[in-house]
Image (tube, helix red, strand yellow):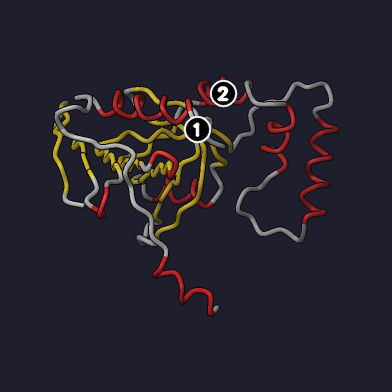
Amino acid sequence: MNKTKSLNKIRREYKLNKLSEETVHQNPFNQFENWFNQVLKIKLVEPNAMILATADKNGKPSARVVLIKDITNNGITFYTNYKSRKGQELFQNSLAALLFYWAELEQQVRIEGKILKISRVESQKYFDTRPVKSRIAAWASEQSKQISGREYLEKRFKDFDRKFFDGKIPLPPDWGGFRLVPDYFEFWQGRENRMHDRICYKKSKRRWKIVRLSP
């Protein structure tokens, strides 16, 4: 653990870009699309990875990386096992937060809002686009449940692989999508001397108010 003594020496300067309330899009979804298109251009690994933060009914937080699968003006959609820890916490407490961090562009986006469970029809439509083995894995994994070992998981996968040998794999009853409906966006652009740009959008009725925050 002696190496941790050097953590306070880790430094980098941020000089790639800048952000102002005068140049951002009036709609935060359009601003996000603009940044995300830049991310796609530089071909990052897992460009759609985001951190999802949830809390249980007592306010105990937890966070993990999930993948964004759709974004429209209605919200941001991702998929999971509804019986997983995150799924159960979202049923207990529908408020959640997302974080995208793209170090290569010195940017991050924070999004907060309320979670809604999407329809089974919509979940089925996405599920059918997944690779066959991924669909089988959705049946095999009792996500977040304690298991005896890797062998148990692999046996379940093989069992379901045999069961669905014809490739006709139905949507698991406890698997599907959630949609975060935002009421807050914050776009962070790294700047020199830690004088970062922070532009946020706050939802007020049907309009977005744009304000700058101190770094």
Q: Amino acid at mark 1?
A: Gly
| Distance CA(mark 1)–CA(mark 2) | 9 Å
The residue that appears at 17% across and 26% down in the rendered structure is: 206
Measured along the vertical axis of the image, is residue 96 above or below residue 57?
Answer: above
Q: Residue furthest bottom?
A: 2
Quarter that holds the N terminus? bottom right
Q: Position of residue 22 (x, y in %)?
A: 14, 29
Q: Are marks 1 and 2 in contact (CB under 8 Å)?
A: yes
Which picture quadrant has residue 197?
top left
Q: Nearer the viewer, residue 54 or 70?
A: 70
Q: Is residue 129 left or right of residue 32?
A: right
Depth order, front residue of 213/206: 213
Question: Residue 143 at x, y = what percent?
Answer: 62, 48
Vertical placement of residue 51 versus 47, above or below: below
Quarter residue 135 falls in? top right
Label count reads 2
Label 2 SS: helix
| Residue type, label 2 | Tyr
Closer to the chain start, of discs 1 and 2, is 2
Name the residue nearer the viewer: 34 or 70: 34
Q: Residue at x 50, y 33 (%)?
A: 177
* Residue for point 14% across, 39% down: 211
Identify the secondary structure beneath mark 1.
strand
Spot occupied by residue 161 in the image (x, y as percentages of width and height): 81, 33
Q: Is residue 154 left or right of residue 3?
A: right
Picture coordinates of residue 138 (x, y %)? 66, 37
Mark carried by residue 126: 2
- Give neighbour class at mark 1: few <14, some 14-19, many 20+ (Cα, 10 Å): many
Give the number of the disc on residue 177: 1
